[in-house]
Amino acid sequence: MENMREIPLDQEGLIYSGRIDRKDPRKPEFIFPASSLHFRFWGRKVVLKVENRSVYWDNYIGAVVDGVQKKWLLEKKGQTELVLVDEAEDRGHDILFFKRQDSCHEMVLHTLMLSQGAALLPAPPISQRRIEVYGDSVSAGEVSEAVAYTGKEDPVHNGEYSNSWYSYAWMTARMLHAELHDIAQGGIALMDGTGWFQEPNGMGMESVWDKVHYAPELGEASSWDFSQYMPDAVVVALGQNDSHPRDYMQEDYESAEAVSWRRHYRMFLEKLRRQYPSAYIICCTTLLNHDPAWDDSIEEVCRELSDERISHYIFRRNGKGTPGHLRIGEAREMAEELAVYMEETVYGGQKEIVPDEEMPDEKCFKREGTECTDGI
């Protein structure tokens, strides 16, 4: 490697966003999807070395480099050297480096290197709006890039189509000019013992919501310090995976299991309210096909709580949009609806909704290799 200069990863001018483990400020650990590092620099080359801890699937990392989205395949274990920019001449660059996937892997940032003579530029502005989302694979953007399967079941895949950038959660945040913490995990349900995550034992959001590390295969769990991030609004998008392994809500709305779920859902909302006394809490499910009895249960709990800052939002195609994961266009549909609702409900219609980017070139998602630069 040419002569490069190391930039400490806790240096002023590096802007982090997401529920990130920063117990060692010079080696931040990305766990949740949409966790990011944003910076600007003047120079010709930048290299970032990261350590991957893989549990399953292939693991990809993403970055928006000067307005162009790219992705790289990470080594299953150990460090990967990522050349984010490599040009012949010095000029200004804007880089948003982010985690595309959920706890199928964790990633540690080790070294940021700039070319000789390069320098960090003033930090990009930080939004004063803050959103937090608790959800499953749809909130994480899982399989979102499989646009050829829009409205269909998922294709066979190994993680290559998952991208938090195209989750409705991050799209909504961008439309609202807001920072996002995306506490989303594929396969997760509300309660332990149900859902697909950590099956057959089943780890629910009840055991994840207040954690930084939580995947058993990746070490001991650790707690999150909620004082680090106080959201204006919290979106709770649970109730999709709760029907696995049995859809008891559809079978009998008044069964003991259904009543227990509503009790646990209420307790979860009450925990969030204690952490965030002033936040708006918006409950929802998604366009992914599911029985409306789950939405009826959410509505019942919200009515019982009688909290003017807790509401239930139903999308126009709620539970009827697709049998597979949401693709980019479907996630955008959700985001456009949710952003309008949140702008009015949470922010009083103070700003104009920002349209999200156009649908990227579908050729990009069909290409082999570790990087794509024309349209994603």
Image (cartoon, rainbow, N blue to C red):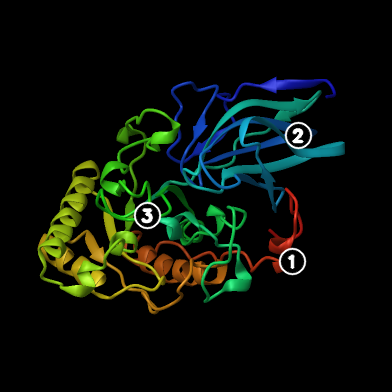
- The nearer-to-camera label among 2 and 3 is 3
Which residue: 47% across, 38% down?
Answer: 31
Looking at the image, is 263 positioned above or below residue 27?
A: below
In three-dimensional space, the C-alpha distance between marks 3 and 1, rounded to whole angstroms, equals 31 Å
Image-quadrant location for residue 157: bottom right
Residue linked to disc 2: 42
Sequence order check: which comes first, mark 3 or mark 1? 3
Residue 10 vertical position relative to residue 244 in the rendered view, above or below: above
Judging by the rendered image, the residue that carries numbered circle 1 is: 363
- Left or right: residue 165 compared with residue 286: right
Name the residue: 58% across, 52% down.
159
Q: Quadrant of the C terminus?
A: bottom right
Q: Mark 2 belongs to which amino acid?
A: Trp
Q: Is residue 73 visible?
A: yes
Position in image of residue 217 (x %, y %):
43, 34
Q: Nearer the viewer, residue 350 or 355?
A: 355
Q: Residue 88 appears in which quarter of the rendering? A: top right
Q: Which mark is residue 196?
A: 3
**In the foreground, 11 or 3:** 3
- Pinpoint residue 121: horizontal percent, then vertical percent: 68, 33
Q: What residue is rendered at 10% in x and 63% in y?
A: 256
In the picture, measured across the screen, residue 2 lies left or right of residue 39, that is right
Q: Amino acid at mark 3?
A: Trp
The residue carrying pointer 2 sits among few (fewer than 14), some (14 to 19) or many (20 or more) residues within 10 Å by Cα, namely some
- Work out which residue is located at the far right of the displayed protein and give it: 88
Instruction: Pick the residue in front: 348 or 65.
Output: 65
Q: How many neighbours does mark 3 have within 10 angstroms: few (below 14), some (14-19), or many (20 or more)?
A: many
